[in-house]
Image (cartoon, rainbow, N blue to C red):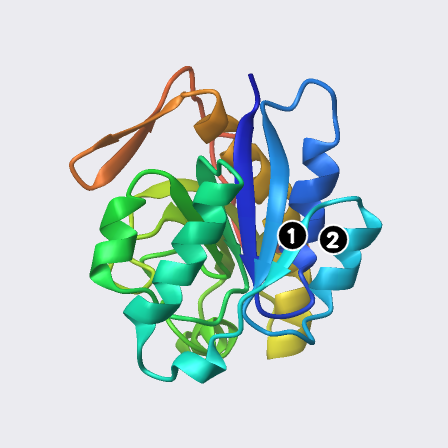
Amino acid sequence: MKRRVAILISGRGSNMSALITAASAPDFPAEIALVISNKADALGLERAKAAGVNTQVIESKPYGKDRAGFEKVLQAALDQHGIELICLGGFMRLFTAEFTKAWYGRMLNIHPSLLPSFPGLDPHGQALRAGVKLSGATVHFVIPETDAGPIVMQGAVPVSDHDTADTLSERILEVEHRIYPEALRLLATGKVQIEGDVCRTAGSSASENFLVAPVVG
């Protein structure tokens, strides 16, 4: 049986689209059963509808700072659709500790940096100001602390001296679209186990011995 997944979005749904595409493969172990947006004008809603995925809008603005009130309605929608796993795809709404604990080990997020480096806002700018030579993306479990949950998968890209936040973001986005579906695949097949604050993946191995940047001819 395929695991039933909800994707929560607030905007264009770029990673959402990558997940929907991956899940359309017959052998993918999860199905995208629902896309929920907290903004009625999110572009990702139309993308999801075009792909034949159920969509729902639960506006968060009317709830203001009442996060628990918003989450009560959200949870009811998740229950109605029999959702087992959640993927956040640019969902611009903080959760209460109670909600994240209830979904611990079943809710994924993706962040455009190699966590624990550069959590929070403007990760690309943070990376450039720090002068790092490698950056990337991280899929992690959601916990009450921002961008701090156990890491499921990471992908790296080199950082050029000529990069801007925009050019770095574009390259990292390609990595995001590759690793997010694979992380969901691992979770849906039960290959990811959390031991303390660390994820262990059955049968895993490094793809290469090392990655070096910059490369000088």
Q: Quadrant of the C terminus?
A: bottom right
Please tell me whether residue 199 is drawn above or below residue 10 in the rendered image: above
Whichever of labels 2 and 1 marks the residue nearer the N terminus, that label is 1
- The residue at 35%/60% (across/down) is 72
- The residue at 72%/45% (across/down) is 53
Q: Position of residue 153 (x, y in %)?
A: 45, 40
Query: Disc number at residue 16?
Result: 1
Q: Is residue 114 visible?
A: no
Asked if the residue at tag 1 contacts the one at tag 2, i.e. Cβ–Cβ closer than 8 Å, the answer is: yes
**Drawn side of residue 57 relative to residue 79, left or right:** right
- The residue at 45%/38% (across/down) is 85
Question: Disc 2 vs disc 1: which is toward the camera?
Answer: 2
Q: Which residue is mark 2?
A: 48
Q: Secondary structure at mark 1?
A: helix
Please tell me whether residue 53 is drawn above or below residue 60 in the rendered image: above
Q: Position of residue 212 (x, y in %)?
A: 51, 48
Nearer to us in this view, 26 or 214 = 26
Q: Quadrant of the N terminus?
A: top right
Nearer to us in this view, 23 or 133 = 23
**Drawn side of residue 142 relative to residue 79, left or right:** left
Nearer to us in this view, 5 or 133 = 5
**Which quadrant of the structure image shows residue 63?**
bottom left
Q: Position of residue 84 (x, y in %)?
A: 44, 35
